[in-house]
Image: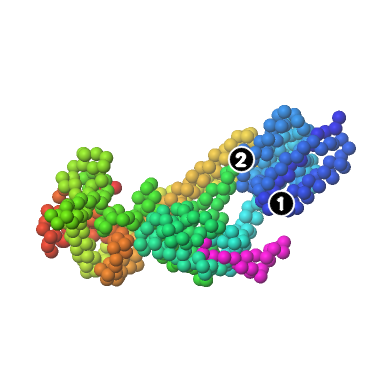
């Protein structure tokens, strides 16, 4: 009785499958089967666009199907063009092959012959095959990333076609070719779209409109989107998130390592060119990073120091910054109308604690405030505060902050880095033990070692996340001299811009220096973004009259609990 043979063909990208790779594997396997008198072709398994290195065995549907068919005893031989078609993960692929052989299925390669597991030497060869395959994948990944970065520096992208060009750009022929003779595309600005891309950033970072509002403006003005589609929040968000608009085309924004589907990576993990491509920049780096800060702050789950108010129809200046200090609810706009004797309608606009919509338990005695009752004294207080900052000596404050800042996180980071080194040493020991186990010189089973390696790698991954987060905290808390000096030097310019700005820009300018304003029964607290000793918050007595004393800075400030 002839042995039933099934073939497995795999390519890492769908484009490979569309060309010659799958037919090549099929022809080679067919010819090999014909050379065996006791073999007969039974069926085939095909994987398109599946990485044998990035995806785990459990995430590959075809391997799971093969295992089910093996348990049903549906075939006798699994044939591949080369053994790396089964996988490239040294921590699990050797054991997949062992499992197949243990279940009476012969594993063959057209180029490498039969894989047997009859003794410890066979096990070692089997392991080293996939250890080498995994190493080749890692090297390929490194080469690809380096090549992408080098091409990015020249403005040449690895993808092409009008459909894939970011909004505001288009592709032209670059005059350079791939190894297969395909001409690469070069990205340049699209004259018809670049002004609209700039407008999106201006509306978002300067005027303060939200992404939904910007999409509505573009749709109302009949500004064309790509392929006849209407503008949406997600479209605006993708434009605001893409660093190409500041002259840095990004690569490797997604990954499928250990996952069945691609997942977006954090910005810090993207590949960006080392140098800015000036001819691609539509906005400044400062504007782009400001947009990221605003996006992050407007995430309801992320209370960062860069909280920016979204522009609303309200004619009140501090909506979005003003909160009730007694109950924690934000202030909202309230209107009332009064009909005069001549029939004219007089409108009155107030700041009002929004808790009244949900509960009547707010301890704030005065629920509503007239516009000038809050805005004039707060603005005067802010301007006086900035005048005082211009007069202080920052040298001692800087020295104290730089000395005391980040000590706790620095110690935790050192401990974390030490643990990572210990984990890496442990991984080396465990992998050496795997080779000993294959040779029969270890007291540990291969299954146990595989589990220990997986657990240790997971532990290392968690430590790397912790290290990254600690570095992020340190960077955020790092108080450099030039940062505070820059703040001090910008005060005169800021005041001039503020006094001459329209309402929308005034609101955004205020959000640059104010984090939050809290209204209590007996005081109003203004929390500034600059963290300089007693100058972080200022408080004034709400019962004082509107005069010069009203705006006095109190050095013994009251800090809100975080």
Q: Are marks 2 and 1 in contact (CB under 8 Å)?
A: no
Q: Kindly identify the residue that appears in the image at 55 percent across and 52 percent down.
A: 254
Instruction: Name the residue beneath numbered marker 2.
Output: 59
Instruction: Name the residue beneath numbered marker 1.
Output: 18
Q: CA distance from mark 2 to mark 1?
A: 23 Å
Q: Nearer the viewer, residue 385 or 378?
A: 378
Above or below, 384 against 38 in this view is below
Specify the segment rendered in magenta: 167-186
Counting every numbered tag in the picture gives: 2
- Residue 506 lies in the magenta stretch: no
Judged from this view, the residue extending furthest toward the front is 342
Give the quadrant of the N terminus.
top right
Above or below, 531 against 392 in this view is above
Q: Nearer the viewer, residue 303 or 339?
A: 339
Q: Kindly identify the residue that appears in the image at 42 percent across and 51 percent down.
A: 470
x and y percent of residue 244 in the render?
Answer: 51, 63
Is residue 487 visible in this depiction of the protein?
A: yes
Residue 8: image tag: none
Judged from this view, the residue extending furthest toward the top is 72
Q: Nearer the viewer, residue 396 or 307?
A: 307
Earlier-in-chain disc, 2 versus 1: 1
- Dot 1: what SS? helix
Horizontally, residue 161 falls left or right of residue 204, namely right
Of badges 2 and 1, the one in the foreground is 1
């Amino acid at each position: 009785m002839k042995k039933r043979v099934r073939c497995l063909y795999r390519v890492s990208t769908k484009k490979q499958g569309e060309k010659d790779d799958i037919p090549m594997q099929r022809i080679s396997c067919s010819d090999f089967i014909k050379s065996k008198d006791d073999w007969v072709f039974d069926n085939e398994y095909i994987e398109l666009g599946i990485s044998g290195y990035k995806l785990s065995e459990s995430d590959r549907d075809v391997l799971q199907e093969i295992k089910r068919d093996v348990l049903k005893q549906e075939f006798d031989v699994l044939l591949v063009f080369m053994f790396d078609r089964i996988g490239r993960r040294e921590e699990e692929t050797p054991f997949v092959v062992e499992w197949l052989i243990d279940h009476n299925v012969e594993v063959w390669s057209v180029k490498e012959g039969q894989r047997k597991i009859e003794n410890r030497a066979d096990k070692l060869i089997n392991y080293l095959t996939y250890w080498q395959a995994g190493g080749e994948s890692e090297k390929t990944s490194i080469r690809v990333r380096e090549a992408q970065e080098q091409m990015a520096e020249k403005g040449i992208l690895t993808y092409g076609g009008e459909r894939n060009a970011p909004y505001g750009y288009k592709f032209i022929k670059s005059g350079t070719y791939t190894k297969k003779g395909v001409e690469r595309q070069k990205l340049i600005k699209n004259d018809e779209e670049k002004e609209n891309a700039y407008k999106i950033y201006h509306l978002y970072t300067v005027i303060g409109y939200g992404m939904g509002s910007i999409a509505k403006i573009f749709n109302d003005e009949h500004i064309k989107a790509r392929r006849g589609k209407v503008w949406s929040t997600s479209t605006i968000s993708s434009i605001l998130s893409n660093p190409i608009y500041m002259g840095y085309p990004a690569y490797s924004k997604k990954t499928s390592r250990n996952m069945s589907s691609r997942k977006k990576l954090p910005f810090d993990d993207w590949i960006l060119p080392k140098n800015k491509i000036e001819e691609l920049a539509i906005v400044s780096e400062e504007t782009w990073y400001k947009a990221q800060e605003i996006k992050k702050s407007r995430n309801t789950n992320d209370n960062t120091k860069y909280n920016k108010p979204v522009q609303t129809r309200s004619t009140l200046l501090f909506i979005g910054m003003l909160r009730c200090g007694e109950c924690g609810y934000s202030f909202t706009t309230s209107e009332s109308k009064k009909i005069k004797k001549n029939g004219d309608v007089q409108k009155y606009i107030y700041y009002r604690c929004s808790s009244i919509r949900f509960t009547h338990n707010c301890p704030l005695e005065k629920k509503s405030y007239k516009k000038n009752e809050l805005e004039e004294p707060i603005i005067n207080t802010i301007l006086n505060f900035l005048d005082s900052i211009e007069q202080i000596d920052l040298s001692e404050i800087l020295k104290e902050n730089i000395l005391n800042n980040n000590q706790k996180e620095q110690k935790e980071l050192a401990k974390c880095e030490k643990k990572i080194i210990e984990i890496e040493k442990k991984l080396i020991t465990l992998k050496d033990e795997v080779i000993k186990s294959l040779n029969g010189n270890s007291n540990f089973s291969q299954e146990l070692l595989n589990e220990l390696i997986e657990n240790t790698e997971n532990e290392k991954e968690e430590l790397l996340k912790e290290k990254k987060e600690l570095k992020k905290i340190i960077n955020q808390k790092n108080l450099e001299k030039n940062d505070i000096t820059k703040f001090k030097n910008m005060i005169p310019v800021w005041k001039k811009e503020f006094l001459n700005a329209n309402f929308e820009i005034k609101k955004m300018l205020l959000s640059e220096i104010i984090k939050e304003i809290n209204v209590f029964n007996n005081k109003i607290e203004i929390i500034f973004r600059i963290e300089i000793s007693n100058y972080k918050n200022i408080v004034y007595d709400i019962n004082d009259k509107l005069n010069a004393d009203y705006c006095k800075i109190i050095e013994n400030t009251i800090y809100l609990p975080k």
